[in-house]
Image (cartoon, grey):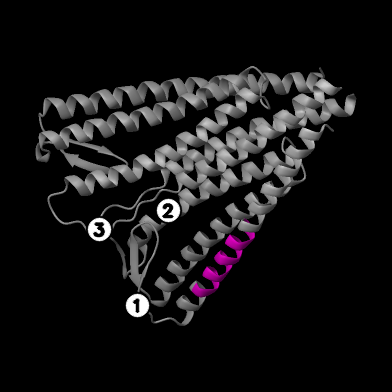
Amino acid sequence: MRAENEARQRKVERISGGLRMVCKVVLAFWGVVAALMLWTFLVGRGPEFTGYNHVSFYTGELTVGGRLIVGGLCLATVGVAIKAVWHLHQLLGDCSRGEIFTQDAARQIRQWGIACMLWGGVKFAWVMLPRVASGVHLQRGQGEFGVGLMVNGLIIVAISWFMEMAAEMREEQELIV
Amino acid sequence: MRPENEARLRKIRRISGILRAGCKGLLVLIVIGYLMALVAVLADRGGSVGYFDLWFRISDLTPSGRLLVVAMSTLTSAVWMWCIYQLHQLFGNYSRGEIFTREAVGHLRQLGVACVLWGVMKIGWVGVLCALSTRPMGPMQVGAEIIPIGLLVIVAAWFMDMAVDLQEENELTV
């Protein structure tokens, strides 16, 4: 490999390694958030908790059923965030090994796109929450339905599908050569 | 080329052709929407205009407020068109079987930039709402997840660009 290419490869490895570290920190952060949320919903009587997407509630005012619903949605939100960051972490792992145009990298991009779509779904669920759980209020202004995120996720999934097909074709051709 | 690969390539061409047609339809819709908003604001026959679920009653707007809304509408429509145009071009590359090429990666990067600008416009509209509102506004939440998504697309495209460099040089060496 030429010297410039080696330097490029090292740069890719260094930067993706750094970004992977950031992903690890973000994953740890979301883990702590999930633990705090569980504690809040199981035993908390705390003050107003501002939810997500313009939704707010007092934890102490929620019924047992309400706590279960809101807690479940909070965990789903954290779960989707963790999924998105995890696939990004894996994608950066592929990049750090120089495996950028591979089937695995394309699959990680697709999973990331799916996480974006799920995030849109979670946003929609938050807006719908006041209708199913008493004591939960939609703040002034409207919540967003998350359609834009779903469309974005869908585009990312479509792009990754093309990439996966191309990577599959290339890998097959390389085997023939 | 093996028959399975030829079939795959045909599939890629067919689907990207359909998605390109979808992009063209979206571009037409954006232009129509923009013209409708423009006529509504300038003609001042009542009604409301809205972007990103933020609505403005036209009769409540002052002349300078109207100008601001028109300017923001123009910018927002331009960003949307830029975003869809990049997607259209990207699918054009795919339909020619050019998936891991510098041009395709360039469109992907531009798409990421357009996503970031999309998020910035969303925040901008909240600013316009605060500026034009006659009543005092409290703190507002803005869902701008599209900005980090755009930034990540830019980073992914940057890695791909590097990979294209490496790939082209390797091909030349062989």
* Mark 1 or 2, closer to the camera: 1
> Counting residues from the N terminus, which is met first, the one under dot 1 or under dot 2?
1
- Mark 2 = which residue? A123
* Mark 3 or 2, closer to the camera: 3
| Relative side of B87 to B54, left or right | right
Callout 1: chain = A
Q: Specify whether residue B161 is painted magenta.
A: no
> Counting residues from the N terminus, which is met first, the one under dot 3 or under dot 1?
1
What is the CA distance from the residue labelled 3 to the residue labelled 1? 19 Å
Q: Percent from the top left, x then y, of residue B170?
A: 81, 27
Q: Nearer the viewer, residue B158 or A58?
A: B158
> Counting residues from the N terminus, which is met first, the one under dot 3 or under dot 2?
2
The residue located at (60%, 33%) in the rendering is: A159
Q: Specify whether residue A33 is painted magenta.
A: yes
Q: Please give the range of residues in magenta.
A: A23-36
The mark found on residue A47 in the picture is 1
Q: Is residue B146 above or below residue A32?
A: above
Callout 3: chain = A
Q: Is residue B172 above or below residue A122?
A: above
| Tag 1: amino acid | Pro
- Mark 3 = which residue? A140
Q: Percent from the top left, x then y, of residue A61?
A: 33, 77
